Image (cartoon, rainbow, N blue to C red):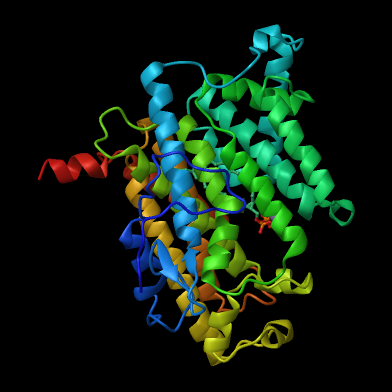
Amino acid sequence: MAIMLVRAASPGLSDSHHGGLKKRAPARRWMLCSLKYGIEPGRSSAVYSSLAVSPAGEAVVSSEQKVYDVVLKQAALLKKQLRTQAPPVLDVGLQDMEIPRNGLKEAYDRCGEICEEYAKTFYLGTLLMTEERRRAIWAIYVWCRRTDELVDGPNANYITPTALDRWEKRLEDLFAGRPYDMLDAALSDTISRFPIDIQPFRDMIEGMRSDLRKARYKNFDELYMYCYYVAGTVGLMSVPVMGIAPESKATTESVYSAALALGIANQLTNILRDVGEDARRGRVYLPQDELAQAGLSDEDIFNGVVTNRWRNFMKKQIKRARMFFEEAERGVTELSQASRWPVWASLLLYRQILDEIEANDYNNFTKRAYVGKGKKLLALPVAYGKSLLLPCSLRNSQK
Ligand SMILES: CC(C)=CCC/C(C)=C/CC/C(C)=C/CC/C(C)=C/[C@@H]1[C@@H](COP(=O)(O)OP(=O)(O)O)[C@]1(C)CC/C=C(\C)CC/C=C(\C)CCC=C(C)C
Ligand SMILES: [Mn+2]
């Protein structure tokens, strides 16, 4: 397997600028995706290296490498903005807009209500944050929710790629300080306060585009890219708001990688929880090559019978999702103190969905894995305890 350091195109992702040569995605991730997962080299099209040679002899850039380029770019932008303390890339300050200050308060309050209505757990988590950060996360949440609703909501049948192009134009406008409505105005204000870049937002729209044209994923490499688009992006959007602890010795890149891992872990969990629901909409988000290796097909999923083959397949998928959660854990401790609690809470709660799938004997065809109120409540003090721990980077450097 050849590994080359060359500049290569990343279709669907904006170009990254870090000096011509590509840095390789950390080798640890390859461990995550395949070796620990038990896939032998040569048997799977999952990620092996930054640049591999396909059976046809062409150089192939893995999804992991493409996404890692975005991580590097986001980390570099954050470091640059924090160094110069310059306000982010707004062409027009919100002070020039016609939205009165109390209008902005109303807009943020509405974002909070929407977050509470759609995502009680996230909402509870945000209540533990500082006011400015909480409002910013609400604004980001609402933009993400609205973007997802375009392809998943009641009008989804009428959504075309052109509608998504219009949504992207609107995104560019709000980043330039020209919001279209009150909810956009809240996000416009947020990006004037935090060093947030537009790329993860653009990439999420790209994920929704792919949902319009694609209902199957050949292998984990393709699925990884999808998970980055629709969920890893949320991690990248959130880091500049959550903030890195001033005492942390971790690199900005490693914190972004952990945030990305949390988004991927959450989305893999979503996919495993919703197998039956997605199948009823004609969608199978599981890697086709891994299904085939397990002796399973789409037909088995549509039939929805829990067999030993299915249980074994699910065990491996759950194991992989847990590895991404594990990778995310290393980054949570590096976040600013006030942000750790909500992120720990959401990590613990989301991860428990995997335990519930196991408790349902892997019947994710007709039973929705659900974390009960008691367990949810219990997660809060556990998360609080974890949030008091010193950053991992400090603990290791003190040894
Ligand atoms: C260093 C470190 C660990 C930092 C933490 C970074 C961080 C806060 C990461 C958050 C990761 C996260 C919550 C990702 C969301 C993943 C997700 C659930 C994506 C869903 C996509 C589409 O899936 P699908 O259609 O299959 O699912 P539904 O059936 O529709 O649910 C999304 C729906 C995309 C849209 C995402 C959101 C609406 C959630 C956005 C959430 C936030 C901005 C809040 C993050 C705040 C906290 C406190 C975790
Ligand atoms: Mn959705």
Residue in the image at 57% along x and 46% along y: 121
**Where is residue 381, by image quadrant?**
top left
Above or below residue 105? Residue 10 is: below
Q: Position of residue 281 (x, y in %)?
A: 78, 69
Please identify the residue farthest to the right as the structure is shown: 158
Q: Position of residue 95 (x, y in %)?
A: 66, 8
| Residue 121 visible here | yes
Residue in the image at 51% along x and 16% along y: 87
Q: Is residue 103 left or right of residue 220?
A: right
Q: Is residue 8 left or right of residue 6?
A: right
Q: Quadrant of ligand 2?
A: bottom right
Q: Position of residue 292 (x, y in %)?
A: 57, 87
* In the foreground, 301 or 374: 301
- Viewport quadrant of the N terminus: bottom left
Residue in the image at 74% along x and 23% along y: 179
Above or below residue 207? Residue 38 is: below
